[in-house]
Image (cartoon, coloured by chain):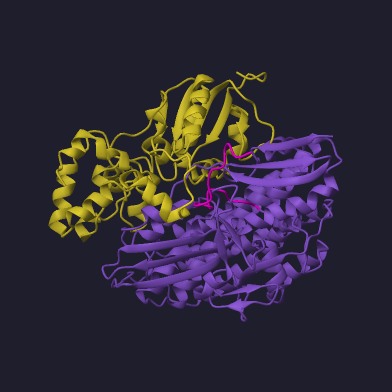
Chain colours: A purple, B yellow
Amino acid sequence: MATEKIEIRHITRVEGHGSLYVTTKDGKLEDVKMSVDEGARLFEAFLVGREYTEVPEIACRICAICSASHRLVSTRAVEKAMGIEVDQQDTNLRKLLVWGEYIESHILHALYLALPDYIGHESVISAAAEYPDVVKIALELKKLGNDMQILTGGREVHQVTPMVGGFSAYPTHQDLEHMKERIKESRPKLQTAIDVWATLEEIPFERKTDYLCIRREDEYALVDGDIATLGGLRAPVEDYKSYIKEYVPDYSFAKAGTMNGCGFFVGALARLNINNDHLLPFAKKTLKQLGIKLPSYNTFHNNAAQLIECAQVFEMTEQTIDGLLSSDLEWHEPKVVPRGGRGTHIAEAPRGSLLHSYEFDKNGLLKKADIIAPTTMNYVNMEEDVRAFFPLIGSKPPDEIKLYLNRLIRAYDPCISCSCHVTETSGRT
Amino acid sequence: MGDNGKPTVGIFGFTGCAGCQLNILNIEDHLLELLELIDITTWRMVKSENSKGPWDIAFVEGSIAKQEEVERIKTIRENSRILVAIGTCATHGGLPAMRNFQDIDEMKRIVYGEKNDHLDVIPIKRVADYVHVDHELPGCPMDKDEFIRTVKALAVGKTPNIPNYAVCYECKIRENACLLKENKFCMGPVTSAGCGAICPTYGATCEGCRGPVAQVNWGAEYKILKEMGATDDDIKRKFLKYCPVVADAPEFKELNF
């Protein structure tokens, strides 16, 4: 037997353009290359010289699906640099914005993009004819997430209201009460989606790796916390460079993240593995129903983990809205006095940890930006997973191998636009 | 037309944030109805089985940012009856075209370090710089209602109606207080409407994401902003944020920054 190449150009049902190249010799895997085919936008470079007020507005355009998370992380990094404290009311409204994004993004990935593989369809569009009820629920739940983002951010993609130092407008008590009702009414719909998921057959694949996310001792951390790993690391965000290394692999110009020289996993499964002690009853019940034992080392569980997190976010949203309803919701103008300095923030975007780190001059113009997106962090782990997974599927027909590899990469919910400095590999096969 | 008598549609992403494609998915209430009107035969973000064309209508998101994309957009054009550019990256180059003003080699070094020789990076351009575009839906992101109206019009062979008046017009209809009068740097007077003046409605200034309005009067806006205390640098930054390609427009050059 000779050398064979398996080329997946492009990975479908993911956000952005990526390809996977696998080389085998005598049926054994020789080489794996994940490539990112997005054009380079060079955000970190053209942000230089921009005013602190517009940095989050520009930075959130790195990625539409994670735009609320980019907006929040960027805003917090600016605020830390400017020495601004954020009050509880604004913090809670920002949480609602990001949790709306969680519902929208997780439903999009789990039910629109991943589910068709489990039920033998090429897309949610073709699945709609056979499973109209499930697709209708998916549409309704996704809309709920978007409406939460509209309520707090003014728009579902690239929000309008979030500002450095606050918001340009607030929702009313009535709007919030209405949203709380909708969350309550939507629980049975989410439960139906979970019930459907519980009937699906999962691919048995395990590979021990390390998992990273943020962690707090008082709640399931999504918007603020310390860096934590399943391996036991706890570190303040400012120290990120000591742990997360970005490098340019010698076969490509894609930046990739490593920890202790190896890949690591970020995303819903990492958060469940590390922060499951903070799960609320609905999510706990869902975890049990879906039969996932934690820690799980099965990358495919990341799909189900997103549904478990939807249950968690439903409950957290109800609690947070209760908190906001007892406050006066009196709007304050976001006021900031610019100053020079550094600020770094890390939070959990739906598909994994996201970090922005900035340095400003005394007039509030950006001097330096470092942005590490979830897909950058997962990049090496994806390739390591392909290496470990291939022996399990290598004897299958080529089309099936391609399908399984597509499913493995898709399980990461990769966001290739997000990896704004991961780029270009055409011609390196 | 496809076998089912519906126009075939391809949805394509070039370099961008995928927000305009996402906004098509965000049409939750009408998505299934739209699928009654059109047959989406290609959409890599959503489907695994994708046709190689031809298409009756192609919707193209993103800017052209690498040489490979130049070839790809030409192929899509050759195989499409109608081509619609969606979102400001496709219609005007978008925010990332800011990188055209800087030294590309230096920027590559900032982002990727010294090992960057093989990066396929060309100046960011809009779709219409390479191929004929039949219709343009600007906006960052594209407005999803405008998209629905466009699909409905094209499906029955009509020309979509895309506004060419200023954001101020829609802002007045919504009875918003004028942000310029509150000394805020609003771009409403020089920006194309169609967004329903969403940003001023939420108390945030218009940032010009839909591009310059027809017969734009930058001179008057420049004067207002100067009177508010903005510097030439502030104004230039603002004018060129979402549509840096306007730097080449004769009206813009007349401003003499």
Q: Is residue A189 left or right of residue B234?
A: right
Q: Position of residue A417 (x, y in %)?
A: 53, 48
Report the quarter where the N terminus of chain A lies: top right
Q: Quadrant of residue A21?
A: top right
Is residue A158 left or right of A264 when viewed as pictured? left
**Residue A298 falls in image quadrant:** bottom right
Segment colored magenta = A413-429
Residue at the right extreme of this rendering: A395
Query: Does residue A344 lie above or below B21 as drawn?
Result: below
Q: Is residue B197 magenta?
A: no
Judge whether A384 appears above or below B125 on screen: below
* Most common SS among magenta residues: loop
Residue A204: percent from left, percent from top = 84, 55
Q: Residue at x 44, y 32 (%)?
A: B85
Query: A354 or A388, which is in the foreground?
Result: A388
Residue B228 x, y percent position in the rendering? 16, 58
